[in-house]
Image (cartoon, coloured by chain):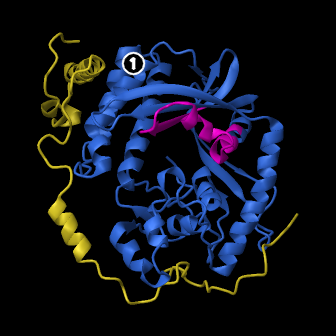
Chain colours: A yellow, B blue
Amino acid sequence: MQDEVPTDLTALMSLDPLDLTKQDLDRIIQYQRKQRLAREGGAKTKRATSDAPAVDIKALLGRITSKKPATDNLFPSEPNKDRPGIKPKAPPKGFIRRL
Amino acid sequence: MDNIVPLPTPSCFLHDSYIQYAWDSTSLGYLKTCPRLYYYHMICGYIAKDESIHLRFGSEYHSAIQDFEIHRASGLQFEDALRETVRLLLIRIKDWDPDITTKAGTYKNPRTLVQLVVDYFDNYRQDSAKTIILENGRPAVELSFRFALDFGPTGHPETQYMLCGHLDRVVTINDNVFVIDHKSTTTTLGDYWFNQFNPSNQMTLYTFAGKVVMDMEVKGIVIEGAQIGLEQFTTRFARGFTYRSDDLIDEWLNDLEYHLNAAEAFAEAGHWPMNDMSCDKYGGCRFRDVCSKNPSVREHYLKSDFIQLEEKDRWNPLSVR
């Protein structure tokens, strides 16, 4: 195991995993342990999202305003049309009791 | 050997019908929670857009634990087993690229998965729970089970219902046998969280299955909770015990017959009624927004907010891990 722990996991994780050496894997594990110690010590750790905004508000607004209710009727338990041979029947009176 | 193609997983439904004959805790849980939820998931194959992230994260977490146990059982020391586990994990998730702009993706992604796996094994490095080694030398992890019940659909007496599933790990703790089940959550691992597992459809089924599969006196289930912090990725682990007597299991099996009779009746009717007392459970049903709309426009909301999986990709209790 190497003493030097990487400060950025991205480079290691972006390598082809099939090419990772024993030392590479040990460095990844050491990095995670160091991160955990830092967290337990109250330090702020780097998040995966870095600078990217968590939510694209404009795209969300676009989605909401573009929603138009469908006009076709859908019975919620309409059978799957791809499944052959089944036809909905009238509900039986009560459940089938075997006991 | 390269030409061998795995056989497709058989359907869990009887031919040309929606009568499900092979049940696991997930599908049975949907049915018990709300027949309409069952219908959307099991019959229609709808999943929430971010559900695939949760499923993949959980699946890889389970696989890593299985790999580690296999390496340990083969004689590898802790650090060597962990290294090989991480190697296999990275190979499996090489092409996994969840959308990290989604809420699920911010805390469930390749980096956090590796972090969780390393934290988990470090946390349980000195563990009183010892994995049972099976007669074939393999550790009792990810044990798939399937067994037939002594009853079947009323309209199909030639068929027997089946119970299926996977036991995460079977261990001894102070000479008592328990099934360990791994759960990841963002909820605090306190009494409130652990109390949800007694009574619990899954935990009673798994205790019963453990007795059948292991042919041992299984005391109950150890719920191994992994709490994931959202703000910055943190992990915390805790275990809770839940016990099932034979009488409780018998009662559960007796009730099961009523539930499966009801499922058969829903399938025969082609109608799965809504249980509007379940909509706010567990932080709110994912289909709540759909069910609150007029029936005539529900399909629109399903199509826009959910993914409808192809039949082969839908949840199937008969799928082999």
Residue B177 appears at what percent x and percent y?
A: 68, 25
Task: Give the total of numbered labels.
Answer: 1
Q: Residue furthest right?
A: A99
- Residue drawn at x 33%, y 36% is B113
Is residue B99 placed above or below B231 in the rendered structure? below
Residue B1 visible in the shown view: no
From the image, which quarter does the C terminus of chain A lie in? bottom right
Residue A82 appears at what percent x and percent y?
A: 48, 81
Residue B200 falls within the magenta-colored stretch: yes
From the image, which quarter does the N terminus of chain A lie in? top left
Residue B300 appears at what percent x and percent y?
A: 37, 78
Asked if residue B109 lies left or right of residue B4, the reply is: left
Residue B42 appears at what percent x and percent y?
A: 54, 65
Residue B78 falls within the magenta-colored stretch: no
Disc 1 marks which residue? B122
Asked if residue B198 lies left or right of residue B305, the reply is: right
- Residue drawn at x 37%, y 28% is B235
Tell me where the magenta segment starts and ends, as one range. B180-207
The three-letter code of the residue at mark 1 reads Asp
- Residue drawn at x 13%, y 47% is A52
Quadrant hosting residue B143: top right
Is residue B91 placed above or below B317 in the rendered structure? above
- Residue drawn at x 26%, y 23% is A32
> Along the line of sight, which residue is nearer the eye, B106 or B142?
B106
Circle 1 crowding by C-alpha within 10 Å: few under 14, some 14–19, many from 20: some
Label 1: which secondary element: helix
Is residue B108 placed above or below B137 in the rendered structure? below
